[in-house]
Image (cartoon, helix red, strand yellow):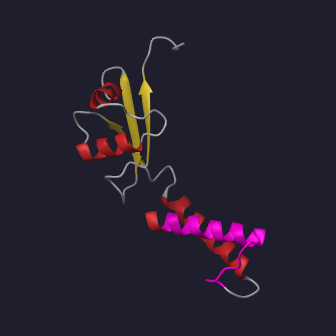
Amino acid sequence: IRDVIHFRKFIQQKEKHDEEGKQQSKDLTGPNHLIKLQTLERNIKTILTSLFRPGVLNLQRITYQETPASIIEQIAFKEAVHPLQSLQDLRTRLGPGRRCFAFFHPALPNKPLVFVHVALLQEIPK
């Protein structure tokens, strides 16, 4: 799946270059190469949309006690909004009054695709 996503990104970059007239595609020649790229990109998008529709993904709660360490490690390294500062920071985010949930695809049961951390509070923080 990762390769398909990277291939789609490659096609989108080729489309952009061809549309801007900066570079002609060496992989698809002829007068219709841009149309071929656009058709291929739409087909890949359809496949990815089908593979990752909400009914296919599994939502799982992530806990420090029950979730395998390899999954927790992936979540820790992929955190982009509020990067972890320490192991204690991770324990806090998975501790009392906090929840972490992740979506998994059946074909990738050990790879969290999307995750969210939630803090359960009595009032809205200032």
User: Residue 55, relative to residue 50: is it above or below?
Assistant: above
In the image, 33 versus 83, the foreground residue is 83
Identify the residue shown where x is 44% and y is 36%: 116
> Is residue 18 part of the magenta span, yes or no?
yes
Point out the residue furthest to the front here: 22
Which quadrant: the C terminus?
top right
Position in image of residue 106 (x %, y %):
37, 56
| Vertical side of 19 occupied by 36: above or below | below
Examine the rendering and report whether any part of residue 1 can be seen.
Answer: no
Q: Residue at x 28, y 28 (%)?
A: 91
User: Which residue occupies 32% across, 29% down?
Assistant: 94
Using the rendered view, name the quadrant where residue 101 is placed: top left
- Magenta stretch prevailing secondary structure: helix
In this view, 84 is above or below 119 = below
Q: Is residue 89 magenta?
A: no
Residue 107 in the image: x percent, y percent?
36, 60
Q: Is residue 124 left or right of residue 2?
A: right
Picture coordinates of residue 44, whole percent (x, y)? 57, 68
Rendering coords of residue 55 (x, y %):
48, 51
Measured along the vertical axis of the image, is residue 58 above or below residue 81? Answer: below
Q: Which residues are magenta?
A: 4-28
Residue shown at 45% from the left, 54% from the top: 56
